[in-house]
Amino acid sequence: MTIAAPSADPSAIRHIIVLGTPSATSFTHAVAETYRDAVRDCGQHASLRDLYAMRFNPLLGPTERPTVSGHALLPDVAAELALLEGAAVIAFVYPLWVGMPPAIIKGYIHRVLGAGFREPDLLSGTQVSLLHGKRLLGFSASASTRPWLEEHGQWASIRQGIDSYLASVFGLVDGGHVHFDSIVEGVPEHYVRECLAEVRETARRTCAAVLSERHARRNDARRLLLAQ
């Protein structure tokens, strides 16, 4: 399991990076590490949750189904929710296999993000307070190209069925999705460097955005106090 560097400031802006790849030497793993390091360079806190290294169980247990209520959270889910609660950004990083995210990523979404979620809450417009307002990012990679994914409907499936849907259901801010094409064995090093430079730039933009939002909230709070 990848452990985050300790943060001396308990009020530091926090990013949770959820990584779903079995290879520690893969391009996708490098994307997650690059994003983590860029966030830390910006003075913010980043925790890398390497699901395969953690041996995260993606199987939804019988007591975890949305239709079952009254059961305590399992320890692994409770630990992840505790991390997410203090985060400003949740970044999912994964390869696409057969045009879809790995099962371990979907299992994390079902078991962790979906913990305690009830469909009647969606119909009534009830906010999921734990996740509401956090920024959601996506990074993916595949051997195919994005035009090919678009032609076969997979890109729309990922953006609408995962990113947009999660943002809508859980009240997350859609921070965008960066996809890297043609990631195959023997990919040229210069192309990898270009991709990782894009990851760093995305991290910097995201850090700047969440910092600006924090300042705006604090200024609003001060104005409210002065107006009382």
Image (tube, rainbow, N blue to C red):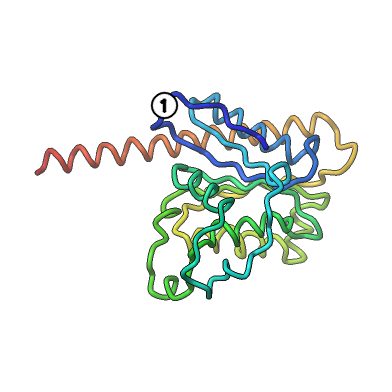
Label 1: state its secondary structure: loop
Residue drawn at the location 59% of the way across and 51% of the way down: 76
* Quarter the N terminus occupies: top right
Q: How busy is the neighbourhood of tag 1: few (under 14 within 10 Å), some, or many (20 plus)?
A: few
From the top left corner, tell me how far across and down residue 132 is, in percent: 42, 55
Of 94 and 175, nearer the camera is: 94
Task: Work out whether 124 lies above or below 112.
Answer: below
From the top left corner, tell me how far across and down residue 116 is, in percent: 48, 64
**Drawn side of residue 139 relative to residue 208, left or right:** right
**Drawn side of residue 39 relative to residue 50, left or right:** left
From the top left corner, tell me how far across and down residue 118 is, in percent: 47, 71
Task: Work out whether 105 lies above or below 44.
Answer: below
From the top left corner, tell me how far across and down residue 84 is, in percent: 50, 47
User: According to the image, label 1 marks what residue?
Assistant: 9
**Drawn side of residue 9 relative to residue 50, left or right:** left
Of 124 and 73, nearer the camera is: 73
- The amino acid beneath tag 1 is Asp
Task: Please identify the residue farthest to the right as the structure is shown.
Answer: 186
